[in-house]
Image (cartoon, rainbow, N blue to C red):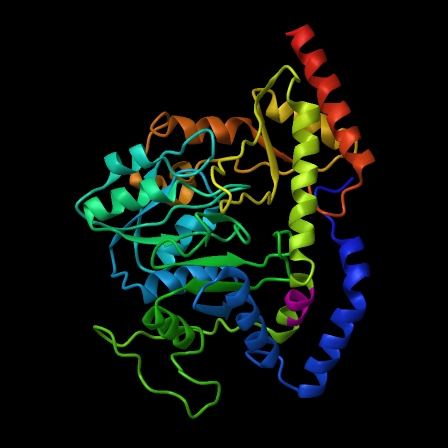
Amino acid sequence: MPFFSQVATFEQLWPTIENALEDVFRSGKFSHGQQVGQLETALTHYTGARHVIGVNSGTDALVLLLRACGLRPGDGVLVPAYSFFATASAVVLAGGHPEFVDIDPRTHAMDPAALDAAVTPRSRFVMPVHLFHTMADMAAIGAVARRHGLTVVEDSAEAIGMRRHGVHAGLHGAGGVLSFFPSKTLGALGDAGAVLTDDPQVADTVAALRHHGRTGRTLNDFPAISTESALPGVNSKMDDIQAAVLLAKLTVLEEQIARRAELAAAYTARLRDVPGIVRLPRTTAERPDDRDVHYVYLIETEHRDALVAHLDGQGIGTEVYYPLPLPHQPAFAHLGHRPGAFPHAEAAARRAVALPFHPDLDPGDLDRVCDTIGSFLATTRTTA
């Protein structure tokens, strides 16, 4: 049983995808073309963003967003201590300095109280991450940011469909991003990403930076970008093949989000009373216009590593999110963070594991996962 699969989804959508790919092949425009423009428009309607700019990956989206928002070399960017490596590496690639903040153990997102205490004289940005199924507390984080004069950008790579107070993830500050890595809620056949923003200047700058500094789609459109100084662009255009796939999958996105909610509820019902599980996902939606979206289904147990090995032996795939907190990654060893400095992030890194979870998952497979977890943890508890 794989951790992730989209075979059934692609079988359902293949006629639509095949027609769109034929359009791409006939056009002879394989990058930065008509399909990309159509996807950008479709995503503005879906998210409510005024501007969506397609790029090569979610990581590139973060780098270009930070640069477009005015990050200067050495600026401090406050990020959660528990996230995928790209959250912090994007800061470095954009020229900034990552400053780590502990998480709220209930949501795995940046803790606003810890953020307030972590601000330094060099801090200029705060970049919360919306992990797994729910958004960070953007109201509280926004209040801290205003108090300290910080620019808010969102690592909303996992958060398509998530909303607070009716506002889509990525639109609670200067901008946000989406990742379309294949396993994401809206996934392509390879890497792709996008920047979301309501700021036309940020949008124009990202659009130019993704295309070597050009403001148009031809070799003639090459004026310099004027900010405090010219910003060199990169090659981070989205492929039309990926855009065509994403346009097809966007038509069933709401259906798949609903399926994910059903699977998450089924997992919770089966695992709620299992001894040995420390934490299950919990909703943070408080209003009718709030929405959580389950990207993965994450549990925490003190027996994580043994459980992962047991599930693997039974042919059940899992993913460990994330085995090492960002401050303790070798790339950031020079910052000198000691074990214990980020207790909630360190606990999650030790205990968290994601279970098989995708719209194609069969209910019988879900039952098998839960039965295997329950019997293993019961045996572990008895022999402990």
Which quadrant: the C terminus? top right
Q: What is the count of numbered marks?
A: 0
> Which residue sits at x=30%, y=74%?
231
Q: Is residue 285 above or below residue 180?
A: above
> Which residue sits at x=69%, y=28%?
309
As for residue 60 lying within the magenta part, the answer is: no
Q: The magenta stretch spans which residues? A: 244-248
* Residue in front for this viewpoint, 75 or 51: 51
Residue 148 x/y as whole percent: 20, 46
Residue 251 x/y as whole percent: 68, 63
Q: Is residue 29 left or right of residue 235?
A: right
Q: Is residue 356 visible?
A: no
> Which residue sits at x=32%, y=72%?
201
Residue 62 x/y as whole percent: 42, 59
Q: Is residue 231 above or below residue 75?
A: below
Taking the view exactly as shown, the residue that stands out farthest to the front is 288
The secondary structure making up most of the magenta span is helix
Residue 297 x/y as whole percent: 62, 37
> Which residue sits at x=63%, y=69%?
242
